Image: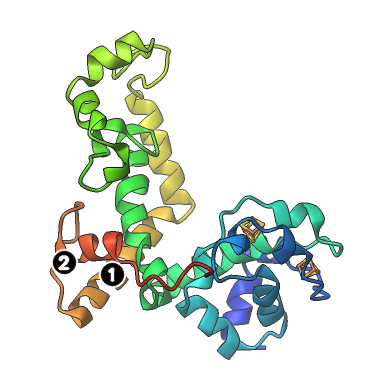
Amino acid sequence: MGALYDLLQEDYRFREGMKACINCGTCTAICPAASFYNYEPRSIMACVQQRDDKCIAELLRGEEIWYCAECMSCKTRCPRGNAPGLVITALRSLSQRTGMFTCSEKGRQQLAIKRMIGETILSHGYCVYAEHVDTVKFPEQGPVWDWIRAHLPEVMERLGANFQKEGAGNLRKIDDNTLKELSAIFKTTGALDLFDTIEKASAEKAKEMGVEFTGHGTTDGYFTKVFTENNQTHTRE
Ligand code: SF4
Ligand code: SF4
């Protein structure tokens, strides 16, 4: 047993998700992500169960742990009561905390998630905010989205939303007390520290790659690189 395994053991999601794996492969068979990505929850469970830090470090540096969709279908079918999805969330956290997430293409995208979703939760109280979704980063929205964004208040009113206004209703303005509460939750749970760790590790990686890194926003060279890069090795043939 090594230091990385010990750190995993401290995570209640790991203790909850890993009882004793018999390597039956049921989790892989039912996993929707495994039908698309080069990925097997069974082999991740087998690696972790060996308590071998070398194998665990490879997972923390690799692409596989980022393929899981956290749907927890695996938990419903495992004959031994394991939850590979929970084990994988613990592995992801450890990869973030140790900075190893920057070693993989999918892992480096943690910076994009932190800046585009994490920071939006803190500033607006929503994971995704219509004004932040543009067709440069999300071309799949189609050209009609540019028009919708330019006319958001009118469109939202016609859809019956209470867009950016006080009171009840969809897409309402989230009040300051709720935003302060969200910040307190992020601080108490260590999420803000994790945000800092993600920024610092990403800055180091950007330096190593020789790519511009400003430490904020969604337009610097490193952000654009991690957001758009795809080495085409992730999915099954
Ligand atoms: S985690 Fe459960 S379903 Fe998956 S291989 Fe192990 S025992 Fe089988
Ligand atoms: S939680 Fe992850 S590993 Fe489990 S079935 Fe869903 S995608 Fe697969």
**Quadrant of the rendered image holding ligand 1:** bottom right
Tag 1 residue: 202
Tell whether 234 sits left or right of 179. right
User: Residue, x 56% and y 69% (percent of image)?
Assistant: 91
From the viewer's side, name the closer residue of 53 and 33. Answer: 33
Q: Vertically, is 83 above or below 117? A: below
Q: Is mark 1 on a helix, strand or loop?
A: helix
User: Residue, x 16% and y 66% (percent of image)?
Assistant: 213
Q: In which quarter of the image is residue 53?
A: bottom right
**Distance from label 2 to label 1 (Cα)?**
8 Å
Q: Which of marks 2 and 1 is nearer the N terminus?
A: 1
The disc at residue 40 is: none
State the image coordinates of residue 117 (x, y, percent, origin top left): 36, 46
Tag 2 residue: 213
Residue flagged by tag 1: what amino acid is it? Ser
From the viewer's side, name the closer residue of 143 and 112. Answer: 143
Q: Is mark 2 on a helix, strand or loop?
A: loop
Looking at the rendering, in which quadrant would you find the N terminus? bottom right
Q: Vertically, is 10 above or below 167? A: below
User: Residue, x 70% and y 65% (percent of image)?
Assistant: 28
Residue flagged by tag 2: what amino acid is it? Phe
Q: Residues within 10 Å of mark 1 (few under 14, many from 20)?
A: many
Q: Mark 2 touching mark 1, by CB under 8 A?
A: yes
